[in-house]
Image: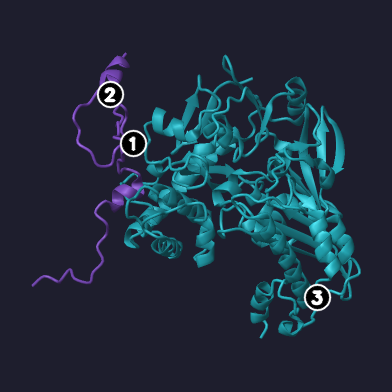
Chain colours: A cyan, B purple
Amino acid sequence: MNSTIRFLLNGIEQSIDDVKPDTTLLNWLRLDKKLTGTKEGCGEGDCGACTVTVASLNASGQITYKAVNACILFLPMLDGLSITTVEGLRQTNGDLHAVQDAIITHHGAQCGFCTPGFVMSLYAGYENGLDDNRQNIQQILSGNLCRCTGYGPLIDAGQSAARHTPSPDQKTAQIARQQNEITYLQSRQNDTGMLTIETTDQAFYAPRQMSDLETLAITYPDATFLAGGTDIGLWVTKQHRHIHRFIYLGAVHALKTISRDDDHIHIGAAVSHAEAMDAVAEDYPGLTEVWQRFGSAQVRYSGTVVGNIANGSPIGDMSPCFLALGAMLTLNHGGTRRTLALDDFFISYGKQDRKSGEFVESISLPRLASNDICYAYKISKRFDQDISAVLMAVRVRLDGQMIANIRIGFGGMAATPSRGYQLEQALKGHDCSQPLPEQAVAALASDFQPISDVRASGEYRLLVAENLLRKMLVELSENNGVFRLYPSELPASPDVPVLAIDALAGDHT
Amino acid sequence: MTASTLHRPIAHDSATLYVTGEARYIDDIAFPADGLHIALGLSDRAHARITAIDVSACLASQM
């Protein structure tokens, strides 16, 4: 047992005792270390002003840098890692880092408050090997909000930094800094003790072995399982909830793995969205856009795939995708495992099929057959970092042009992520080159009666879902080599939404 | 004759402070021990003559 949190901060090891386990990295940096370069903007992982980098070794032993939001990371989660803040970028001779120079040269700072966050996001990208593609820079900066300079100069700065050839001095400094981090990370890699922090009214456990996790989960059935903290962080910073007991999953070696067999890809409960997205991008090209628009770079680096499912949010973007794929969950109760179709996990709003003392160990995604096609569509007000009004994901098996089998998952349409069972039945046997059948429209309305809230009205959600089905048919028939002139198919009835069809037709004339 | 500065980009005065995190904002200044707090008491009339200010409730709240 070990009660001291130790990590590298700007190259120097810190040992921290006597700290409340829900102390955020941001508060510790600003209030204890007086390192005020890292800013607090929103305090909920949206604005990116608090971005720092966390370095760790990947499966092949290489150092990788992740840009993360310090405002929703709890200090004990950082044990064994290497943190860099904006104060740590200057070389010992006082020279600036390439990304800092680039922001100055390209006039990427006006009021300057968001700047340290932008610097750190670009720094993570730069150290990982930055691609100068504009879209790539936009992705890297998707979790940083700027309200006065504007993104143009900041993206220019990112592209310029990516094209920058480091001077021999800069190269030497970079190698020395990384080598120091690698040495430290290697020295901590085989730690065995379980980090345990117990204060008068709070406890935090970070087991490394699965057996320890199983025991803890049974012993403390009221504990809160913590993985990436992108949701639980807000319980603390925004709802001021007092969490009595944390069981942290991020240090359990066996939960950090992605493995494959003939039928499935298994993703462990501590695997982040960024890691999973990279590993399975080629298996499910249809999910790429949704995954790239999931939260922001920082959220994808911290948040876990399984966490997004286990907390049962009705608007979590990955759940409908995995419902469409036909994913299975593996739940672990004291070492006894059971598998469950994801469909059966979501019982009602906020309620999942998870017994006391049980935890979700992994999710298994079925591998697609050659005649399987998978699409996912996200409708939200902003491209990046927005909660979906509607998310629709489909997995279709085609037999020629006929829909032989189809699974459709929706988010934002009901109190839990849900499949449209009647809709699926109505579409089976349909020729995908033909317009959306009326019985499918009726089935959709029978499956779902979405609510109105700040994101969208119920009517809008239903209409969007209907139009997404039309879009899916267009894409399916294209995929199948069938090309059509859509305007000729416009229905005569003015009640039918023609705008979406018109817009699609524009792409094909 | 020196070259004109017209039409030439000049870096922001505080740019280096910004990119290094050295620029200080109000929230970056440590709160002094025994520092006083200020709260504004606003009038509920948009256009009126102030004839008296009653601060007795404020004074009564002092520790």
Q: To which quarter of the image does residue A206 belong?
A: top right
Please, what secondary structure does the residue beneath circle 1 have? helix
Mark 2 surroundings: few (<14), some (14-19) or many (≥20) residues within 10 A:
few
Q: Mark 1 highlights which residue?
A: B28
Camera-side mark, 3 or 2: 3
Measuring 66% from the left and 78% from the top, which residue is drawn there?
Answer: A502
> Of discs 2 and 1, which sits in the foreground?
2
Q: Chain of mark 3?
A: A
- Depth order, front residue of A291/A420: A420
Q: Is residue A115 left or right of residue A341?
A: left
Q: Which residue is mark 3?
A: A435
Residue displayed at 72% across by 38% down: A350
Q: Which amino acid, mark 3?
A: Pro
First reached walking from the N terminus: tag 2 or tag 1? 1
Disc marking residue A282: none
Element assignment for label 2: loop
Mark 1 nearby-residue class (10 Å; few <14, some 14–19, many ≥20): some
Q: Is residue A226 visible?
A: yes
Q: Nearer the viewer, residue A396 or A463?
A: A463
Q: Are marks 3 and 1 in contact (CB under 8 Å)?
A: no
Q: Secondary structure at mark 3?
A: loop
Residue A383 position (above or below residue A430): above
- Give the residue at mark 2: B36
